[in-house]
Amino acid sequence: MNTISIRRPDDWHLHLRDGAVLEGVIGDTSRHFARAIIMPNLVPPVVTTTDARAYRERIMAALPKGDRFEPLMTLYLTEQTDPNDLEDGKNSGLITAVKLYPAGATTNSHGGVRDFDKAMPALERMAKIGLPLCVHGEVTTPDVDIFDREAVFIETVLDPLRKRLPELKVTMEHVTTADGIDYIKSAESNLAGTITTHHLIINRNALLVGGIRPHYYCLPVAKRENHRLALRAAATSGDARFFLGTDSAPHVDPLKECGCGCAGIYTSLNTMSCLAHVFEQDNALDKLEAFTSLNGPAWYGLAPNEERISMVRQADPVAFPDKRDTGAGLVTVFDPMFPLHWEVVET
Ligand SMILES: NC(=O)N[C@@H](CC(=O)O)C(=O)O
Ligand SMILES: [Zn+2]
Ligand SMILES: [Zn+2]
């Protein structure tokens, strides 16, 4: 197969940042994607509906002329989140989901939740009104090994929370382990998972073999090969509980190439080409559309996009820029370490 046509994809987990970085990166998403769930971990974070409305306006102002793109806004859950504000945000159509960052788990998460009891009024209201919770599923306790943080989170935080509030709809973001995949599959309802492009392609060797490679560092950190294979099997299976959330997370190069580099991989620019390669390798090109364009909208109760995109397998590798130049500096683009032949030709 050399040509495919699929409904226009959506990205169910995206960091656009703000200011010059936002202006520099947004076109890489809006070129191919119709909608994206926008992460709220700005500095300061997007915590109220008022913050989200203002951020949405800045996103729309930064959009390249002529591009149609719908940012689906999220709020950053804190111990002070007002349940009424969440409900107003949902009712006004502005807020699609609420994001839980365990305090200290990842980039800009110091204001996240430490004591889950304090966040219960907000979580209970979300369960009642059907507002989904997106979770960064890692514990932050220093005695838990960084490679085990997702599995321990499922056991000690997520499963108890879901038992306490079975009506709460939970999206487990950027699943990186076979444990996460198994947990999602074992749930009868109200649980789904996003999978990133890069976790389908790299394991932890990419980060550490032959030298430390900061552009493959993200959180949750890439795991062993058996985990990557479990992610691949889930993503390419067509199972409606799994869909794309790129977690494309731009940081300018000096913030990654230093003594204490930031977590985050920038994949918006070549994600669709990488994914077509992955699905073709696994003889699953017929499942690409479910993963990028159908399962996500179904989970969030939205219609799939009517528009389509076409992708062509070119005989010669397609050239992509190594870096995205933003007004704030250069951002390195994810290098899958194999030539990319699939290209989005018509949007
Ligand atoms: N994924 C990452 O490595 N980084 C994200 C935060 C996150 O999604 O955890 C970021 O905001 O940079
Ligand atoms: Zn995260
Ligand atoms: Zn993220």
Image (tube, rainbow, N blue to C red):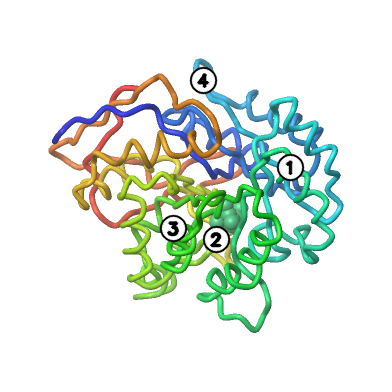
Residue 165's place in the image compared with 55, above or below, is below
Residue at the bottom extreme? 143
Please tell me the numbered disc located at residue 256. 2
Which is in the foreground here, disc 4 or disc 1?
1
- Tag 2 near tag 4, CB within 8 Å: no
Mark closest to the chain's N terminus, 4 or 3? 4
| Label 3 within 8 A of ligand 2 by Cβ | no
Element class at badge 4: loop
Q: Which residue is mark 1?
A: 128
Q: Residue at x 75, y 29 (%)?
A: 53
The residue wearing badge 3 is: 185
Q: Is residue 248 at all visible to an observer of this figure? A: yes
Question: Given the image, on which type of amino acid does mark 1 rest?
Answer: Lys
Quadrant of res 46? top right
Q: Secondary structure at mark 1?
A: helix
Nearer to me, 49 or 163: 163
Left of 10 or right of it: where is 316? Answer: left
Q: Earlier in the sequence, mark 3 or mark 1?
A: 1
> Which of label 1 and label 2 is nearer to you?
1
Circle 4 is placed at which residue position? 68
Q: Amino acid at mark 3?
A: Lys
Please tell me which of labels 3 and 2 falls first in the chain: 3
Q: Quadrant of the N terminus?
A: top left
For label 1, the crowd category at 10 Å Cα-Cα, with few meaning under 14, some 14 to 19 and many 20 or more, is few
